[in-house]
């Protein structure tokens, strides 16, 4: 089976998520807005699901693997809705002037989150469509924790690594720098997988294209007037519409991917009868 140590890598991502978001989320559980919970809980459950799926298939637990895999059909809409919830809280914070970081980098956060949603839709759809091709299916599923890795890891850089730490507003530019550095690490991991597995690692290249697009747009579109206009529009859009659209997009992706991966039933060819 492909990627025999995949579940260890996924568990490592979970550790990074908890460590990176400990001060701003886990330690402030009762104080954060509901949008943080919508994203945080869905993302953690999703990563745990991927770890369980990888562990079960490499320990001969195929019925469990299939059951966990089918659960992803119901989890995926919540994952996308959670990301849409972060877009929602970012936009509403931007409109309300809630802190200098959202004002400065709201546009960058918006495009990064939008590309993350696009990446998840593409890789999960293809994971379902090619679920009978083990290398392809496993690769696409394992890209999903990698896409999540940037956000908590960039926070760890800001908290602990000299050159990324922030001591005041004069250092706010290091926020984008830490995000770019985290994405470069993701791309380095993808490059190593490609060197080792070549064509079998194509799913990681697909994810890498989205990560590269995030890195470019978040770094270059900080002052984009178009993104700021979109933030304002989303800020005045009811939360139920923004989050509901994310849930609907996730549900459509689950449905479309599952149906795309069904075995085609070829009708038997008619046997010619003698005249």
Image (spheres, grey):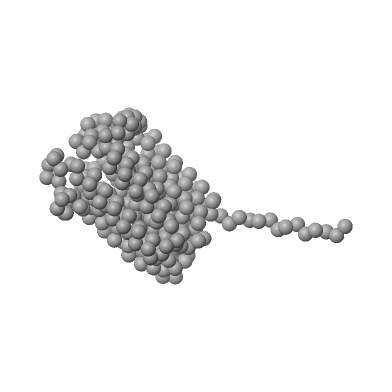
> Residue 169: x percent and y percent?
14, 39
Residue in the image at 19% along x and 42% along y: 173
Q: Work out whether 240 lies above or below 132.
A: above
Question: Is residue 152 rendered to the left or right of residue 237?
Answer: left
Can residue 38 be spotted in the picture? no
Residue in the image at 22% along x and 31% along y: 97
Question: Is residue 262 rendered to the left or right of residue 95?
Answer: right
> Residue 109: x percent and y percent?
29, 41
Q: Quadrant of the C terminus?
A: bottom right
Q: Quadrant of residue 113?
A: top left
Q: How many marks?
A: 0
In front of the other: 161 or 137? 161
Looking at this view, name the residue that lies furthest to the left.
Answer: 167
> Residue 7: x percent and y percent?
35, 64
Q: Work out whether 182 lies above or below 227.
A: below
In front of the other: 199 or 62? 199
Can residue 224 be spotted in the picture? yes
Q: Work out whether 37 lies above or below 70.
A: above
Looking at this view, name the residue that lies furthest to the right.
Answer: 275
> Residue 183: x percent and y percent?
29, 51
Question: Is residue 220 rendered to the left or right of residue 260?
Answer: left
Residue in the image at 39% along x and 34% along y: 241
Looking at this view, name the residue that lies furthest to the bottom.
Answer: 60
Residue in the image at 29% along x and 61% along y: 12
Q: Quadrant of the N terminus?
A: bottom left
């Amino acid at each position: 089976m492909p990627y025999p140590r995949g579940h260890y890598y996924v568990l490592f991502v979970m550790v990074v998520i908890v460590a990176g978001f400990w001060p701003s989320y886990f330690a402030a559980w009762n104080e954060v807005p509901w949008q943080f919970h919508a994203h945080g809980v869905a993302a953690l459950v999703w990563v745990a699901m991927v770890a369980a799926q990888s562990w079960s298939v490499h320990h001969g637990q195929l019925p469990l693997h299939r059951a966990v895999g089918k659960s992803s059909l119901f989890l995926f809409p919540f994952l996308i809705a959670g990301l849409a919830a972060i877009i929602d809280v970012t936009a509403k914070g931007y409109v309300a002037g809630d802190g200098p970081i959202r004002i400065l980098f709201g546009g960058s956060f918006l495009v990064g989150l939008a590309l993350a949603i696009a990446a998840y839709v593409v890789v999960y759809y293809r994971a379902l469509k090619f679920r009978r091709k083990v290398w392809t299916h496993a690769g696409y599923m394992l890209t999903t924790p990698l896409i999540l890795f940037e956000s908590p890891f960039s926070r760890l850089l800001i908290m602990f690594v000299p050159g990324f730490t922030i001591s005041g507003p004069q250092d706010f530019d290091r926020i984008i720098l830490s995000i770019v550095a985290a994405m470069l690490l993701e791309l380095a991991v993808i490059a190593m997988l490609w060197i080792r597995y070549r064509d079998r690692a194509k799913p990681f290249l697909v994810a890498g294209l989205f990560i590269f697009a995030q890195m470019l747009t978040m770094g270059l579109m900080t002052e984009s007037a178009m993104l700021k206009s979109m933030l304002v529009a989303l800020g005045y859009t009811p939360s139920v519409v923004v989050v509901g659209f994310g849930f609907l997009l996730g549900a459509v992706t689950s449905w479309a991917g599952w149906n795309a991966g069904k075995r085609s039933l070829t009708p038997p060819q008619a046997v010619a009868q003698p005249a």
